[in-house]
Image: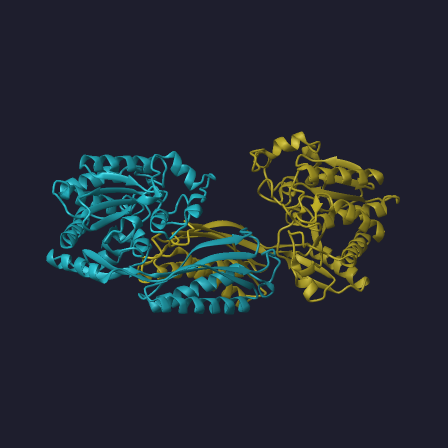
Chain colours: A yellow, B cyan
Amino acid sequence: MFEEFLKTFDEISKIGWDENNGVNRVALTKFDLEARNRIISKLHEINAEINFDDAGNIYGSIGRNEGMITIGSHMDSVPNGGRFDGMYGVISGLEILRLYSKEKLNEKLVLVDFTNEEGSRWQPDLQGSGLATGVFDKNFIYSRTDSDGLKFGDVLKESKFLGQEENRIKNMHPDYYIEPHIEQGPVLEKEKYEIGIPLGIVTDVVDIYTFMGESNQAGPTPMDMRKDALVAASKFIYKINEIANTLAPRIVMTVGEIKILPNVYSVIPQIVELKLDIRSPEKDLAYEEKKIAHELAQEIANEKNVSLKIKNGWALDTINFNEDLIKIIEKSCKDLNLKYKFMYSWATHDAMNMNKITDTAMIMIPSHNGRSHTKEEFSSDSDMVNGLKVLKKTVEYLL
Amino acid sequence: MFEEFLKTFDEISKIGWDENNGVNRVALTKFDLEARNRIISKLHEINAEINFDDAGNIYGSIGRNEGMITIGSHMDSVPNGGRFDGMYGVISGLEILRLYSKEKLNEKLVLVDFTNEEGSRWQPDLQGSGLATGVFDKNFIYSRTDSDGLKFGDVLKESKFLGQEENRIKNMHPDYYIEPHIEQGPVLEKEKYEIGIPLGIVTDVVDIYTFMGESNQAGPTPMDMRKDALVAASKFIYKINEIANTLAPRIVMTVGEIKILPNVYSVIPQIVELKLDIRSPEKDLAYEEKKIAHELAQEIANEKNVSLKIKNGWALDTINFNEDLIKIIEKSCKDLNLKYKFMYSWATHDAMNMNKITDTAMIMIPSHNGRSHTKEEFSSDSDMVNGLKVLKKTVEYLL
């Protein structure tokens, strides 16, 4: 089983891959369509029933309908992404179906490939699972446009993956959803764990800060007559990082995106806009630090004689996965003598939407050096097989 | 005389101006060509002799050749620039020529409009004065390309402003060069001076710093496992500003330009490249702070676990204008009972190149709020007239 799994993973995860650019399998582009067709022929090989819903999500099912376990993730990638993100969950689920395909199962086993999880082509992300679980409205999702102005609804219609609304996973009333996934962080590897069991997904609060100064000539404007938006923003970024360091590992705080105007070496920066991303399993802590960040930014703006606007970006509150399912995954790890760690998923996954409609959990495996969304993304064969073993054992307990 | 001057200034400085976008009179574009033609017809009106050199610099001369005083600046602007930068010097010089045009002068009075002072279209800046004083090589200047790939030499040839190499100002052996200019900083206005007399142009040292971390996912990467290039760069920018503040007003240190990769809110910044611009009248201080900045950046890079490359950008050492000419300008201010301040020019001007070939000085007038290179750039009529009075008196002393 494990050899077959690794062969299939190697085959399908390389669609859209090249060594210089990583994986380019953005939703409903050529290589995503190729991966979809490949997974469908794999499902055909094991005589699975294949359905699409109105988000283009692919469902492959075996067994009769006395109870239903769904396993899934996504096959789309970010531009220049890695081979493991998403794909690991889909190929693991496929292997479980293959394994049971010759048995007469009373329960249904369903593999799901969710459309446009990454949100790289159409925003927001988690689009397929969002529509299939009723989180998003159909008109909203269909009218989203990509960078070429193409609407999701139109592109989906032109692909052969448009199915019926009645096929949505919500309408299937599954008993469980399990999503195997790479950690996308360095913790499991560094702390020498073989499996991560997420208790849920952290709170994520993103606000947009705009510091506004005055763009005078760098030479003739003395230090004490400046309104330098970048100096203010820099102090803010540096201080926020210090705060986050003292609260770690309970929280992460990141400024990853920043716009500067006019961005000319000889001119004092007038406007600096930045996004502050705060994540913590502890919702209250995240919101408390959001407040502290607002106060700190205002204090620095006053001190540096610049003005400040803060716009609430978006916020997702902590979600907790199903406790019973988590216990079964833990028991599976113990049975297999695998070293596991309870943790949180610090990134969103389709499991977030699925958690709203059924008992949901995830199984995480180590990411080498924590690299993800890059061609350097890597999980070893043995780590992938460990995760698959835990998934297999968990499914055995649930059947 | 002053009314005529203000009228001419208003007329010509508005070429390429609109209220929303400021002045767009970039070198050898439509509006710069229009301004050139307008200044030439003004020179024709007073029967000045008109010449161009091989940089497209315009010379308008009156008088016989027993000694030569040159007055000048530039008419090209940055994109979305102001009405006063450069233009003030050219129209002041024109007014002096107009004033003496009916007299039989033994000395030559020459007005100069230097081509592409701003360097907005072709880099480097100070191009026209650089070629005419022998600072730049002709092949180098002619082969510079603009953002459309057009070479300076070709564009100049197509304009009607290409003249002979023998007409370069260096070959005219002038006795003096005086450049009236707006301050482009807030000091004169804030300290209530009417005239600034620059002793020279400050040292300007620009280095390029590249902090290199690792671009992992912001969520799943704990604070203590990060290599965040932006946190390192922010601490550097903030600390540099603190150092500059303690040394003010002897120095200014500015980070105006910064590039971030990948610049995505949910990804830890991998690469931050920034330019640090250090200026001081005290050459030794500027180079000492350059050294301190290098050490500080390395210290921060080590602390934040990122790597660092520093590339020397460019450096201009302090130049000093002619002491005798400065004394005559001071005497003129005293005669006119104008409140003057000895200062340094903290930005470069064509006077920098002219200082290499003749006795050179500048006359500066206040800039409202220190704004420059923007539509808000403003100097009052009375300040402009004060500067013109000082220029006139200085020329009287020199004749």
Whether residue A171 is situated above or below residue B170 in the rendered picture: above
Q: Where is residue A95 in the image (x, y as percent from the top left)?
A: 81, 48
Q: In the image shown, does B213 or A45 lie closer to the viewer?
A: B213
Q: From this view, report whether residue B375 is shown above or below residue B227.
A: above
Q: In this view, does A57 lie to the left or right of B72?
A: right
Task: Name the spot of residue A64 as percent of width and height, x first.
Answer: 82, 41
Which residue shows up at 74% across the image and 47% down it? A13
Q: In this view, does A325 lie to the left or right of A1?
A: left
Above or below, B358 relative to B374: below
Front one among B16 and A286: B16
* Residue B359 seen in this snapshot: yes
Residue B397 in the image, given as x and y percentages of width and height: 14, 55
In the picture, residue B196 is in which quadrant?
bottom left
Q: Is residue A79 above or below residue B247?
A: above
Q: Going by the image, does A374 lie left or right of A329?
A: left
User: Looking at the image, which is closer to me, A91 or A290?
Assistant: A91
Q: Measured from the top left, where is residue A268 in percent x and y?
A: 37, 55
Q: How many numbered badges does the structure rendering display?
A: 0
**Does any portion of residue A288 appear in the rendered image?**
no
